[in-house]
Amino acid sequence: MNHSDLSAKVPSLAAGMAASDHSPDIQLSQTRHRAGLVANWDIAPGSNILELGCGQGDLTAVLAEVAGPQGRVVAVDVADPSYGAPVTLGESAARLAAGPLGPRIDFRFNTDILDPKVDFPDNTFDHVVLAHCSWYFASLRRLRDTLARVRPWAKRLYFTEWDLTPASGDQLAHLLAVLIQGQIEAAGSHGQGNVRTPFSREALLRLLPEAGWTAEDTGLVDTEELQDGDWEITACLDLAGTQERLAPLPEPVRQLVLSQADVLRAIAKPGGNRALAAYSLTAH
């Protein structure tokens, strides 16, 4: 499916998501972003795809559309179906399963790829995909082990994540929100937010060979219309104001987090904060 054909499908794909009932414009922009990613990947009709960190299925729907009636997407997430608001993962998956893309998708929640009971024969999949989910891993080591685990199962890896290097000053608030959350996690106070282990693109490039993958190319992806900067700023300031999460931190770290949260409040706008860019990487 070429770029223009997939772009034409975006409104209907977005409308098929449960979250569109609450925020149709946001869902449309999120689906458009993921369609842009997939349009630049070499995914042929009939492909078998393993998607890790599928969440509510924003990317899953696009992958299923491109894979076509003869294709299959196994969409895996470690989270429980009850996770998420205002729409849970389970509710979103149920909406997709009931729609025209449903027969092409196999959702598997509460599934840890590192569990020995989770296994597939070698070369079961044409592609394994991780998009905007790798910062949720508890550690870089766990990400490396996961990428190594799936290496025999798939021929090609497509990987997308936020780029820690800001391109302009109006992205600094998003960056600071990400780094603060990463510091809280690294200091031992663990939660279930979207940002647990932020890492640079360069760190991923160092990690891939250890997991058996060879990077082919990488490039920046436009995120101009995405709302994730605002979401992470709000999540960070809520976190920094939660005594339960800050209490376990060593006192110097706690004071550092509080001071950085002060800076974040000073530089962040009430809304419309520009998100960091993202990068997309292909490996074999």
Image: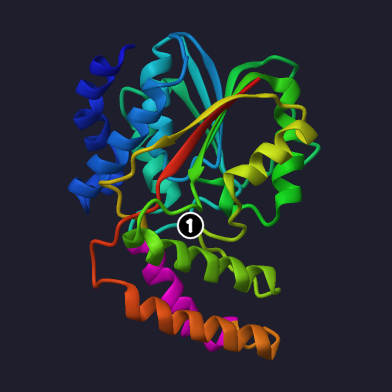
The residue positioned 24% from the left and 23% from the top of the image is 7
For the rendered model, the colour scheme is: rainbow
- Residue at 66 percent of width and 37 percent of height: 205
For this orientation, the residue located farthest to the front is 168
Image point (36%, 24%), residue name? 101
Circle 1 sits on which residue? 83
Query: Viewed as shown, does residue 65 lie left or right of 140?
Result: left
Under mark 1, the amino acid is Tyr
Determine the image quadrant of residue 20: top left
User: Which quadrant of the structure image shows residue 151?
Assistant: top right
Report the predominant secondary structure element of the magenta stretch.
helix
19 over 105 or under it: above or below? below
In the image, is residue 10 part of the stretch drawn in magenta? Answer: no
Residue 36, percent across and down? 34, 29
Does 237 appear in magenta?
yes
Going by the image, does 20 lie left or right of 219? left
Residue 159 can be seen, yes or no:
yes
Query: Element type at marker 1?
Result: loop
Residue found 39% across the figure and 36% down from its top: 221
Query: Viewer-proximal residue, 156 or 244?
Result: 156
Q: Which residues are magenta?
A: 230-245
**Structural crowding at the residue carrying mark 1, measured as other residues with C-alpha within 10 Å and reported as few (<14), some (14–19) or many (≥20):** some
Residue 114 appears in the picture as rendered: no
Could you tell me residue 177's position as x and y percent?
Answer: 46, 68
Q: In the rendered picture of this protein, how many numbered marks are placed on residues? A: 1
Residue 241 percent location from the top left of the image: 46, 85
Q: Is residue 138 above or below residue 239?
A: above
Work out which quarter of the rendered image holds the N terminus and state it: top left
Vertical order, 269 against 54 (above or below): below
Coordinates of residue 62 in the picture (x, y in percent)? 37, 27
Left or right: 246 as drawn, with respect to 186: left
